[in-house]
Image (cartoon, rainbow, N blue to C red):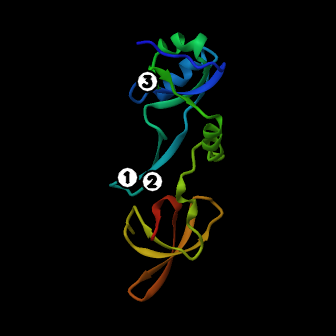
Amino acid sequence: MNIVMPNNRFSWYVVYTRSKQERRACLNLETWHVETFNPERQERRCNQFTGQPTYLVKSLFPNYIFARFDASTMLHNILSTRGVKYVLSTGGSLVSIDEELIELIQSRIGEDGFVRLGDDDVKVGDKVTIKDGPLRNLQGVFSAEMKDTERVLILLDVVKYQARIETTRDQLQKVS
């Protein structure tokens, strides 16, 4: 397969990795002095027996990472790196990614190193549904954010009685 190389020196490209080897591919590419970006997110799960929350680290784009390199000199090295399957191309040309898109994703990374997803649009007074846990499917009103940024206060509407509960933000879903 003939691949057309872009003219500009360093560009961001989408690298397709082997299954669940995004971190491995990043580490191996960094030995070539290639800048990589693997946005990750935290997924909260409740243990079905104890109800205790556990957090899994998952890639935001499974099997895909971003790498910044000079394709004219580094493509062969990239393709021979453990964990890498190929670099995304279309019509025989490598697909480069705009720097602004990478910066946009990087701007959504919190202090914990994980990408913040779109649940930040829940505001005080919004109707919400609890998505997970023992109170699943109960509806209420978003009341307040607690000191720990994950904790929130909800006023539950239960049989004409309002109860105040504390839960985590990721258990909520805004009612449209």
Label ID, residue 53: 2
Q: Which residue is mark 3?
A: 91
The answer to whether 134 is drawn above or below residue 27 in the figure is below
Going from the N terminus, do you reach mark 3 or mark 1 first? 1
Q: Which residue is mark 1?
A: 47
Is the residue 95 above or below the residue 79 in the image?
below
Q: Residues within 10 Å of mark 1 (few under 14, many from 20)?
A: few
- Spatial CA distance of label 2 from label 1 is 6 Å
- Above or below residue 46? Residue 114 is above
Image quarter where the C terminus lies is bottom left
Identify residue type, mark 1.
Asn
Q: Earlier in the sequence, mark 2 or mark 1?
A: 1
* Amino acid beneath label 2: Pro
Front residue of 16/22: it is: 16
Q: Are marks 2 and 1 in contact (CB under 8 Å)?
A: yes
The N terminus, quarter of image: top left
Residue at point 60% right, 73% down? Answer: 124
Answer whether labels 3 and 2 touch (C-beta < 8 Å).
no
Q: CA distance from mark 3 to mark 1?
A: 46 Å
Q: Position of residue 111 (x, y in %)?
A: 66, 46
Q: Which residue occupies the foreground of this view, 90 or 128?
A: 90
- Name which of mark 3 and mark 2 comes first in the sequence: 2
Residue type marked 3 = Gly
Label 3 vs label 2: CA separation?
A: 46 Å
Camera-side mark, 3 or 1: 3
3 or 2: mark nearer the eye: 3
Q: Residue at x 62, y 59 (%)?
A: 149
What element does badge 3 sit on? loop
